[in-house]
Image: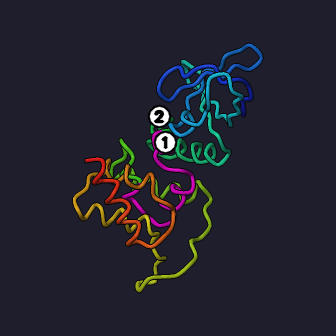
Amino acid sequence: MIGSLRGTFTDRVSNGEVLVDVGGVGYRVSVPASVAAGMGPVGSEAFLHVHTHVREDAIVLYGFAHADERRCFEALIGAHGVGPSLALSILSALSPAALSTAVLEDDVDTLCLVPGVGKKTAARLVLELKARLDLPELGGPSGPSGTAARSPRSEVREALAELGYQPDEIRSALETLPEDGAVEDLVRGALRRLAGSR
């Protein structure tokens, strides 16, 4: 099994697939959108953590910039009903940290922002990934019900949904927001971005 590749980035074969030359052999590797965007110019050195996926009719390589991305990918494809394509879509929309936070906080709405993930799939993923990702218990302050406090980004997402924004718009607005900060400031920043895109 191929666990990693170090070589020369030679081409973007298609959307979500890159070609890495290692000793004269070109490896086609499927990658999340963030990895494809960060590969640099053609001819630059490339290093990818690789998951080798063996099917009856093909051997497919999936590449990631960091080991934790590969770990999340492997946890995702081990979940019921999640194939490699959907797992890549999830990691294209959510970083490992954002995915872990969503799972810890039972934040089904965040997972529903990923194209192809509905409420039922998201709820099942939250349950399965808690065990598969080997997440620590969520500490920190508790709300009045005794549950862990929600992250500022979760509150911003909920506020935008209540204002009538669609999942695609919310996902786009959240992409540029910092991970933490005052909820009011984050909401204002998201609304400015949304106003500029309309």
Query: Left or right: where does residue 100 sit relative to residue 82?
Result: right
- Residue named by callout 1: 92
Identified at 61% across, 45% down, the residue is 69
Please tell me whether residue 148 is drawn above or below residue 159 in the rendered image: below
Identified at 73% across, 25% down, the residue is 7
- Residue named by callout 2: 85
Q: Are marks 2 and 1 in contact (CB under 8 Å)?
A: no
Look at label 2 and name its amino acid. Answer: Ser
Nearer to the camera, 78 or 34: 34
In terms of image quadrants, where is residue 12?
Answer: top right
Look at label 1 and name its amino acid. Answer: Ser
The crowding category of the residue bearing disc 2, from other C-alpha atoms within 10 Å (few below 14, some 14 to 19, many at least 20), is few
Identified at 41% across, 84% down, the residue is 145
Q: In this picture, which residue range is highlighted in magenta?
A: 89-110
SS at circle 1: helix
Query: Left or right: where does residue 28 sit relative to residue 115?
Result: right
Please tell me whether residue 198 is drawn above or below residue 126 in the rendered image: above
In terms of image quadrants, where is residue 37?
Answer: top right
Between discs 2 and 1, the one toward the N terminus: 2
Residue 170 spot, x, y in % from top left: 34, 54
Q: Is residue 100 magenta?
A: yes
Residue 1 visible, this angle? no
